[in-house]
């Protein structure tokens, strides 16, 4: 059986916070993660916790973990506030914080955060360039294409600015990540898709860190796992940014029936329209041994930081993460 190898060049992480586990109850788990073989803890930002607070909590409890945002949206905060949040985490976890930023989606930006989802590629590019200067301690007084910053300087710039990674789906953002960022953050893709997107990033220069957050359900009950995965996929794959991503990957015809059912308001039909093969490619499930073997495919395809996101798991998350941990680390 093939399992994740103890390759020093590959990092393994988890997504924080864990579902159904209060943040205050994460302490013992965080202190055990490194012993299990994990090196990283990453956060996301939708309608639960924000990207920074759980990492500040983790920074105080476990000094061995690398911490990252995957991602902090560039529209929900002003540029200066984003720089201040990143500087604070860099100070709390010196040398082990990664700032992951991205455009997010129109539903989150406009529907929930009262901002305009306009020119996402340009906004991410401008934010990245601003953050480079601000986190280096420079005074920034500049008009960018998508915003202007007048006379801002961090009072407490980090001694060592954090690396900045970009969440990317299609070619424009992937090329930007390759040219100007320190790494790229991937999600909602199959192991077979990884090589294609990494090749585009590498055009900007090889050696960038490639982070992938992979949804994992360690269970032998395939029906239960697929049902949970379908609920999530039928929602995400109808969000325009993800829909266009999978059309670009060549799945437009495969997803046509789901889109038609969704447009008609039939959520159940939309879920049923997703074939098992697609669900299994985008969501990892099976016994822990089977899950580790499937995760290895992402590593073999070019992922250098693999981040597990537990989903639809009713058992003890600590035991699940122990079972999924890379062997030999």
Image: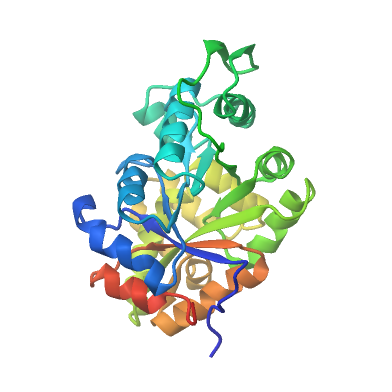
Query: Quadrant of residue 223 in the image?
Result: bottom left
In the picture, measured across the screen, residue 62 lies left or right of residue 172, that is left
In the picture, measured across the screen, residue 129 lies left or right of residue 273, that is right
Residue 32 placed where, x, y %?
Answer: 32, 68
Residue 270 in view here: no
Residue 288 position (above or below residue 277) = below
Residue 273 placed where, x, y %?
Answer: 45, 62
Q: In the rendered view, how is the structure colored?
A: rainbow
Total number of numbered labels?
A: 0
* View extreme (bottom): residue: 1
Query: Quadrant of residue 189 in the image?
Result: bottom right
Residue sitting at 60 percent across and 20 percent down? 138
Residue 104 position (above or below residue 291) = above
Residue 43 placed where, x, y %?
Answer: 40, 49
Residue 208 in view here: yes
Residue 240 placed where, x, y %?
Answer: 52, 41
* View extreme (top): residue: 150
Query: Quadrant of residue 28 in the image?
Result: bottom left
Between residues 326 and 121, which one lies in front from this camera angle?
326
Residue sitting at 39 percent across and 73 percent down? 36
Residue sitting at 36 percent across and 58 percent down? 231
Between residues 14 and 213, which one lies in front from this camera angle?
14
């Amino acid at each position: 059986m093939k399992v994740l190898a103890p390759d020093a060049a590959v990092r393994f992480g988890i997504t924080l916070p864990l579902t159904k586990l209060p943040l205050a109850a994460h302490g013992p788990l965080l202190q055990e993660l490194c012993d299990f073989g994990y090196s990283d803890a990453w956060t996301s930002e939708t309608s639960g916790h924000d990207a920074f607070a759980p990492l500040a909590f983790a920074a105080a409890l476990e000094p061995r973990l690398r911490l990252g945002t995957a991602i902090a949206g560039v529209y929900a905060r002003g540029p200066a506030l984003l720089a201040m949040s990143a500087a604070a985490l860099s100070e709390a976890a010196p040398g082990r914080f990664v700032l992951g930023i991205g455009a997010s989606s129109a539903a989150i930006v406009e529907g929930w955060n009262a901002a305009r989802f306009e020119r996402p590629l340009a906004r991410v590019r401008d934010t990245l360039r601003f953050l480079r200067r601000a986190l280096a301690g420079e005074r920034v007084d500049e008009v960018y294409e998508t915003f202007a910053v007048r006379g801002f300087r961090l009072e407490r710039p980090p001694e060592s600015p954090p690396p900045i990674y970009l969440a990317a789906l299609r070619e424009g953002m992937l090329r930007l990540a390759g040219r100007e960022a320190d790494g790229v953050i991937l999600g909602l893709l199959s192991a077979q898709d990884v090589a294609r997107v990494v090749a585009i990033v590498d055009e900007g220069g090889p050696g960038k860190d490639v982070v992938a957050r992979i949804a994992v359900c360690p269970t032998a009950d395939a029906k239960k796992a697929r049902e949970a995965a379908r609920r999530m996929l039928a929602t995400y794959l109808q969000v325009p940014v993800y829909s266009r991503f999978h059309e670009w990957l060549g799945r437009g015809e495969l997803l046509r029936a789901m889109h038609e059912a969704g447009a008609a308001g039939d959520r159940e039909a939309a879920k049923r329209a997703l074939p098992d093969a697609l669900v299994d490619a985008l969501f990892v499930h099976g016994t822990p041994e089977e899950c580790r073997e499937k995760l290895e495919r992402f590593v073999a395809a070019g992922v250098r930081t693999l981040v597990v996101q537990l989903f639809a798991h009713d058992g003890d998350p600590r035991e699940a993460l122990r079972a999924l941990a890379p062997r030999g680390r």
